[in-house]
Amino acid sequence: MDGNTQIQLDAPKKTSRMLGTLRNSGRLKSPLSPQAGSFKNQSPSTPDKMSHSPGVTSPLSSVAALFRTKDLDDQSQEDKPVVRSRTEPNMPRLDSILKKGAAIRRSLRFSSKKDKRQDAVQEAEEEGQAEEEKEEEAEESWAKIEETYTLAELPHIPLSVMQINKLIEMEVLEEAHLHLLALRGEFERERLRLTQEDSPVELAKKEKDLSLLYSNLRLKMASIVRTSVSLPARNAGLLVHVARIIQEEDKRAREPGGLQGSWMDAWREAVDQGAQDKVEGVHLESTNHSNASWLAVHLGLLGTAVVNDLEKVKKELCRCYPPSFQVFATYVRSYHAAVCRHLCTLETRATLLRDLYALLDWILHRYRSERILGSLTLQPEMSDIDANMDLDDNFLLRLRQKFCDTVKVDMRAFLDRLVELENEELWSVRKRPDMDDDHMFTSDFSMDICTKVRGNVVNASRLNAELEGEVTASCLGQLKDFPMRFDNEFRRCCSSMRADEPLWSEYCISYVNSFSALQRHLEDEYAECSPLAVEEVDKEVQRVILGLLESVQEQFKDDVKPFLRRMMTRKWLTNDDDFKGLAARTEILAQHCQAMRQPHRQEMASRAHYHVVKEYVGQLMKNNFSCKNRQHDKAASKIRTQSSRLADVFRQMGSREEWLDPVGECLSDIVGQKNKGDIKDQLQPLLQQYSDFSSKHLAAVLAFRGVMRGREHQRILLRLNQLKKTTPSGEPDDRDRALFRDMEATVRTDFLSDLSFFCFTFILPAD
C-alpha cells in the first residue's frame, strides 16, 4: 500500500466532504457531461489545453490532488469567490429582485384583505413564471447526445484500487472510468514487459483488481439504469457517462484487462430488470380481497404505469444516450417482455370468469389501444415499433381454453342454482306459477338462461370471433342435459303433489311454455353458428316438453276415468252427475290450455279430445247395458246431446280433431232407430267417416240397442260387410285416423245365435 492510499484511509470523511465541495462548486465536473461542452470540439492531440488554461481547473488534477495531499487544510482548499456573468442561467434577474423587494415593502406596511389577496395572486403568478423559466432553461441546457465523442486525457498516475472503488460508490463514474483505463494501460504495459524471470504474481493481482473494479462499475451502472425511469431527473446526467463508458468499453472489448461480455448487452439486461421491477411494483390486491374487480383494477394501473414510464423514456431518457442505443425501442421491448412474464403470473391467479375476461380483454385489445401503447403521447416513435406482445402461442391457447372451461363450470353452477331457486320459491311452498302479460303460465328460468348465454357469447365476441364459437358450444353443451335434470328434480320434489291436479298441471304448463321459449331463442340466435349443438339441445328440450304434456294428459285421464267408466250404464241413462263431473274436469283442462302457448295448446286439446271421445264411445262396446223397453230413444238423445257438448268444449280449446265430432251423431242415429230394419240405412255415414268401424263394433252397438240375435241382426252385419267393400277408405290425410281400430268390443250371444251366424257365413259373404 503506498503513501497516498494511507492518507486516503486516514481521512475518508474529510476527502468525501471536500470532493462534494469541489463538485458542488463547479470545479469537479466530468469532461463527459453536457455542461463541459461537446466532445467533438476536443482534439486528442491537445488534451491539456483545458487543464492548463487560466481560470479552469482540470477535474483529474483536482481529484489527484485531493487524494495525494498529505496535509489537507480546509481553509487552503477553499476557492476564490466565483464571479457569475450576467448571462449565467442561475444569475438572479434584475426584475425578479425588484419584484421581491416590492413584495417585502408591501409586507411591511398595513394593507387590507383585498390587497393581501391581490398580493397572494401576484406571488403565485410570479412563482409559476419562475417555474416555467426554470423548465425552459433546463430544456435548453439539454442538447441531443451525438454518436461520436472524444475521450478525455487519461491520468498519468491512476488512483489506487480503493480510491477508484470509492469514486464508483460515489457515482463519479467518468473519473472512475478514466482512472480505470489508466490502470488498465499500466497493466497492459507491465504484461508486455513481463519476461520469464519476472514473477507474474503482481500482474495477476492487478488483473484481479481490474476485474473487481470493472465488476463494481458495471453493477453501479446497472443500478443507475434500473432506477433511471423512476428517477430520471437524478440519473439523467449519470446516464450520459454510462452511455460513453459503454461505447468506450465495447471498443476495447478485445483488449486485455476488461470484463468478458458485451457492455451493451449488460445495459439491455439492466433495462429489462428495471422494467421488470416497475411492472412487479404495480399495486396488486390479494385474490381473497373483497374487491371483485381486483384484476381489472390492477391491469388498469399496469397500463397507466407502462404509459407513464415510456413517456419518461421518450421525453427525458432518450436524450441521455447516443442514437445507436435505440433507447425507446429497447425500453418498449423490455416492457413487452416484463408484461408478458407478469401476465403468466396473473394467469395462475385468475380463476373466476370475470378475471379471465379482464385478462384476455387487456391482452387482445386494451394493451394496443390508445390508452396504453397507442397513446398519442408515445407517437410518432411508437409507430415504427411492433406493439404486439411476444406471448407464447401456447399461453394464449391455454388461456382461451381455461376461459371456455370456466364458462362450462360457471354455466353448470348457474343452472343448478336455477333449479334450487325454483324449489325454494315455488315447489316447497306450493306457490302458483306466475303469468306473463299474455296471461300465460311462465317461469323466469328460461329468460335467465337466455340472458346468461347471451352475456357469455357477447363477451366472448368482444374478445375474439373464434372464441365466440367456442363459448357458444360450451354453453350449449351444458344446456344439453339441463332439461332432463330439471325435469327429474321437479318430479322428485313434487311427486306428492299430483293428487292436487290444478297446481301440478299449472307447473307442467308453465315449464312447457318456458322450455318452448328457450328452444325458440336458441334456434333463432345460435342455429347458424352452432347447428349441431342447437339440434342436440332441441332434442332434449322436446323430450322434456313431451313428457310434461304427457303428465298433464295422464293426470286428466286419471281424473275423468271414474266418470267415463260409468257412461252407457243404467245410472247414466237416468242421472247426469257423471257427465257433469266429466264436463267440469274438461273445463278445468280447457282453462289450463288457455294458459299454454301454441302449438302445445292445440296438441294438448287434440290429445284430450281423442281420449275422451274414444273412452266415451268405448263404453258402448263393453256391453254393460242394453236399451230395452224402448229406452233406446232416450239413450240416443243423451248420446247426441253429450257428444255435441263435448265437441263444443274441445273446439273452444283449439282441438284440431274435428273428425271426431260426427261419431256421436252417427251412433245416436243407429241406437235411436225405432225399426231394427232401418239400422242398415244408417251404416253408410258412419263407415264413410270411420273406415275402421268393424263388425264386432257394430255387434256391440246392436247389443246396446237391444238387437242381439235374429235374422235382422245378421242382415245388418251383412250390410256392413257389403258397404266396407264398396265404400272408399277416405282421403289420404284421413287414412291414419283410427278411432275404432284399437277399441275393444265385447258381445254376449247365446249358442243358437252363434250357430245361426255360423251357418249364415256359408251363404253370406264373409266379414
Image (tube, rainbow, N blue to C red):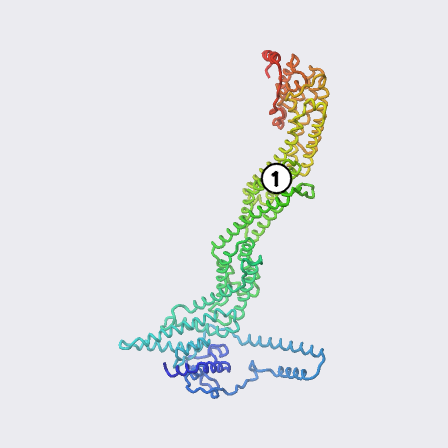
Query: In the displayed structure, does residue 331 sit left or right of residue 630?
Result: left
**Where's residue 68, x and y in %?**
41, 84
Q: Quadrant of the N terminus?
A: bottom left
- Counting labels gives 1
Q: Which residue is mark 1?
A: 494
Answer yes or no: is residue 764 visible: no
**Where's residue 396, x and y in %?**
50, 54
Residue located at (55% from left, 41% from top): 536
Query: In the displayed structure, does residue 341 sit left or right of residue 479?
Result: left
In the depicted view, which residue is nearer to us: 324 or 255?
Answer: 255
* Element type where label 1 sits in the image: loop
From this view, report whether residue 704 is shown above or below residue 180: above
Answer yes or no: is residue 240 visible: yes
Quadrant of the rendered structure where residue 288 is? bottom right
Q: Quadrant of the C terminus?
A: top right
Number of other residues with Cα within 10 Å of mark 1, as a class: few under 14, some 14 to 19, many 20 or more: some
Query: In the displayed structure, does residue 601 sit left or right of residue 188?
Result: right
**Where's residue 573, x and y in %?**
71, 23
Quadrant of the rendered structure where residue 630 is? top right
From this view, report whether residue 27 is shown above or below residue 303: below
Residue located at (66% from left, 82% from top): 103
**Where's residue 609, x and y in %?**
66, 30
